[in-house]
Image: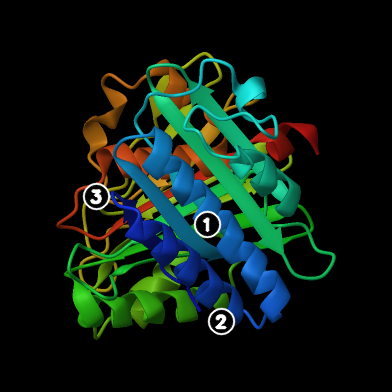
Amino acid sequence: MPQPLTSQIHIDHESSVQHAGSVARKTALSLGWTDALSEQAAVIAGELAGNLVKHASRGVVYIQPLPPGDAMEVVAVDRGPGMADLALCMTDGYSTAGTLGGGLGAVRRIAHEFTIRSEWGTGTAVSARLSAGHRPAGDPELGAICLPAEGERVGGDAWRVDETDGVRTLVLVDALGHGETAAEVARAAVRVHRRDPYRPLPEVLTALNKGLRHTRGAAVAVLRTRPGRAEWCGVGNIRCRVVSPDGTITSVASGPPGIVGWNMPRPVVRRVDPPRGSTVVLHSDGIDERWTRTPSPFLLRLPPPLLAAALTHAHRIARDDSTVLTLGTRRVHDL
């Protein structure tokens, strides 16, 4: 099945702090976690949301399960004012709001994976991940946010990642339309793909075209990485960009126009040559592609999990389903 949708909580009032904790707890319980571990997830979400209420503006908390299904993530993003001294703000007992000042320090202690970036005058982004058992809390090189259009319970975007023997295949589906009908198409596409996710990329698209023939169709993109090589193949309006460590953004040639399931043209595989330390970004058209024109240096320096959330927060088109996938390329170079 596709990855479940991301839960988005706008933190604009103290009541939203309790709501964020409740959503995190329900997400953890849906994964079959114990009450104790689920309560830790609620504490993380509540602490991050509480910090947004006290210190930030236009803050959002994103909560979601992570593949392969035994981890979850809470991400908090805001647009200011940021932290002038991040190390000091992480110190237990430090507070600028007259509170006990245990928020970020507590989150760092509870989380199995913790990532934070902040810039004075720009904002802060925090990712806290929890995992059941002894598995890592998700892939640190992978970030994702998947949201339905505003007002919809489900959406037509879906994604899936498969990995074996150093080969990782990431598929993003953007079904035509919105709501339950589009969601059915997206789920059907993922079911077709999961039967053989490691076939050559043109065959992935060909199989999806056949499998979606009696639906309204979708735009689809597939990214495959292996040691020393990355390839991309897509049809429709899903964008692929490479963000280099120096802040350069390179656009991979767009896939040919068309609809997988209706009038799909011949798929074309394109080589992606990301520099060491760069991030590949895939996104549906629910993200305004003008984000590449004048991005802030702070945004471009973010690691993959934070970059996905920050791009969504700043450039989401609310009337459309929106998905951002970010994939670090360290293993492409280092394995």
Q: Is residue 77 shown to the viewer in this render?
A: no
Report the front residue among 210 and 64: 64
Report the front residue among 293 and 299: 299
What residue would you read off at disc 1?
45
Q: Is residue 114 shown to the viewer in this render?
A: yes
**Disc 3 marks which amino acid?**
Asp
Position of 273 with respect to 53 (left or right) is right
Q: Is residue 21 above or below residue 269?
A: below
Label 1 CA crowd tier, 10 Å (few <14, some 14–19, many 20+): many
- At x 27%, y 81%, the residue is 213
Q: Quadrant of the C terminus?
A: top right
Q: Secondary structure at mark 1?
A: helix
Q: Residue furthest right?
A: 134
Q: Are marks 1 and 2 in contact (CB under 8 Å)?
A: no
- At x 22%, y 82%, the residue is 181
Q: Secondary structure at mark 2?
A: helix
Residue 285 circle label: 3
Label 3 CA crowd tier, 10 Å (few <14, some 14–19, many 20+): some
**Percent position of residue 286, x then y:** 24, 51
* Mark earlier in primary sequence (1, 3): 1
**Disc 2 marks which amino acid?**
Ser
What residue would you read off at disc 2?
30
Nearest to the eye among marks 3 and 2: give it. 2
- At x 24%, y 82%, the residue is 180
**Percent position of residue 254, x then y:** 31, 41
**Percent position of residue 94, x then y:** 62, 29
Report the front residue among 278 and 205: 278
Give the CA separation, mark 3 to mark 2: 30 Å
Position of 245 with respect to 209 (left or right) is right
Colouring convention used in this rendered image of the protein: rainbow
Q: Is residue 147 above or below residue 89?
A: below
Picture quadrant of residue 89: top right
